[in-house]
Image (tube, rainbow, N blue to C red):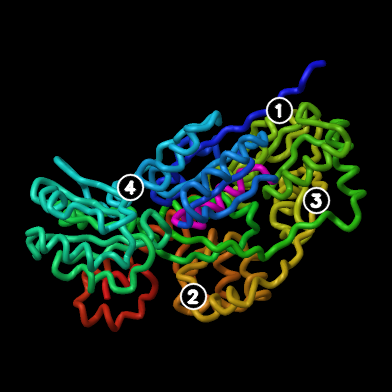
Amino acid sequence: MTRTRKPVGRIAFVGAGPGDPGLLTRRAHDALVGADQVVYDRGVPESLLDVVRAEASSDAQFTPAEGAPGDVAKILISAARSGQNAVHLVAGDPFGHDSVVKEVQAVARTAAHFEVVPGVGQAEGVATYAGVPLPGVRTAADVEDVSVLDFDALAAAVQRGSLALAVDAGDLAAIRDGLLAAGVNGATDVGVTGDGTGETQYTTTSTVDSFVAAALGFTGRVVLTVGDGVGQRDKLSWWENRPLYGWKVLVPRTKEQAGAMSARLRAYGAIPCEVPTIAVEPPRTPAQMERAVKGLVDGRYAWVIFTSVNAVRAVWEKFAEHGLDARHFGGVKIACIGDATADAVRAFGIQPELIPSGEQSSEGLLAEFSPHDEVLDPVGRVLLPRADIATETLAAGLTERGWEVDDVTAYRTVRAAPPPAEIRDAIKSGGFDAVLFTSSSTVRNLVGIAGKPHTRTVVAVIGPKTAETATEFGLRVDVQPPHASVPDLVEALAGYAVELREKLAAMPAKQRRGSKVQGPTALRFR
């Protein structure tokens, strides 16, 4: 009789780093994505956990680590023996925690397979994000128990180079007293950073004598930096000095559409809030699209013109329904109104023939679209799959150029449901520092479902048509890029923020306090 061997799981102790999800190593990412059970420390930020949950298996269980090291080790060992892959996710580096070292020792005494995946230490990682270099001889530690600190050794470290400690905010007074008692000069520079590497990271600089008072209001884990490196923050602080750092930016697009914009905003330090204003639905009568797809396959069209990512998606969904693929576009040329739409077409393995090199709009496309020539263009018909609310500019322009146009409703746009009450209140009361509008319909629908943004909110629009609509609704347009695209829109907003900061920096202190300029950029100077 052959016995079926029970599968054996693996245990991984994974360092999450200082908090920014982007600092997870590839090995840490792989361990988390392949985990059946994740036990996480309470020091791991919720924002990082959200990213991990989104990519992990839908069956994976996430539970907070509770109890003594032996209790956590038992959970991990039990999971492994039942054939599961178990992860203990800890802030910083696993071996930066005495409790985790004890867990590893407990697991090592069993037959369980385990690994330890290093992470960037909280102290060193946050110091780098705060712009505090730790050159020369340095000491960096993630401290769990202040009572075991050797303050004489820490004082010597400050004397020789730099010091960085990740500690609980409640222990700052004890650390101050210990450093002073060990002979550290009370005038030595100190930086205290809260929410290290997070969206709201904030650093206050002072001295050993005064840093406890300066850090009043900080809670949870903070990183304390001591020594000459703190004085270099003015030039080296990069995380908190990004153009849109701390700006709450309203993105009135669906999560699917807002992905690229939100990613760019985060790269500039902003905190995007995605609020869908439009819901996309199939056309009420699908017969038009059915005929259009048949016409594409039968060679009825010379061109297909896509004016949005939604139009691309609608056509490909119809293709999938009939078992068709990109090969059935053979002989049909494709034009796209802009880069985002072109990228959506390329995702299906097709390279568009025409994308406007200038303004990415109906007018820009028409300016580069050749008139119909009966000799060069034996097929004179164009397919234009669009939203039900599309303007007539493009269809009329193509007709003037001698083309026959099949203007087909590929999808309907309907107003989305209102956002939660707290978001509506924030929109009306100035809780957002900026709002980015990418079309006239986003303006109309946002105002319709949530109300007009407050006058202190910076209004950025993608192009002239959107600007006209925003003005019609009584909004002041502050930012409009020279080129109508999402990257240029975000870039223009970042440039506007830099200009605001420079203007405020040049103002006398009294004028800054009286300035009408709002938002994080202004608050830094008050």
Q: Nearer the viewer, residue 123 or 135?
A: 123
Q: Is residue 54 magenta?
A: yes
Q: Which residue is mark 2?
A: 431
In terms of secondary structure, where does tag 1 sit?
loop
Asked if the residue under mark 4 is in contact with the one under mark 2, i.e. CB atoms within 8 Å, the reply is no
Amino acid found under the numbered disc labelled 2: Gly
Mark drawn on residue 125:
4
Crowding at dot 1, Cα within 10 Å, few <14 / some 14-19 / many 20+, comes out as few
Q: Position of residue 444 (x, y in %)?
A: 65, 71
Amino acid found under the numbered disc labelled 3: Ala
Q: Position of residue 349 (x, y in %)?
A: 68, 30
Q: CA distance from mark 3 to mark 4?
A: 50 Å
Q: Nearer the viewer, residue 32 or 11?
A: 11
Q: CA distance from mark 2 to mark 3?
A: 37 Å
Amino acid found under the numbered disc labelled 1: Lys
Q: Nearer the viewer, residue 487 or 61?
A: 61
Q: Position of residue 476 (x, y in %)?
A: 49, 75
Q: Which residue is mark 1?
A: 6
Q: Is residue 176 magenta?
A: no
Q: Which residues are the magenta region? A: 43-58
In terms of secondary structure, where does tag 4 sit?
helix
| Image position of 474 with respect to 64: above or below | below
Q: Nearer the viewer, residue 64 or 464?
A: 64
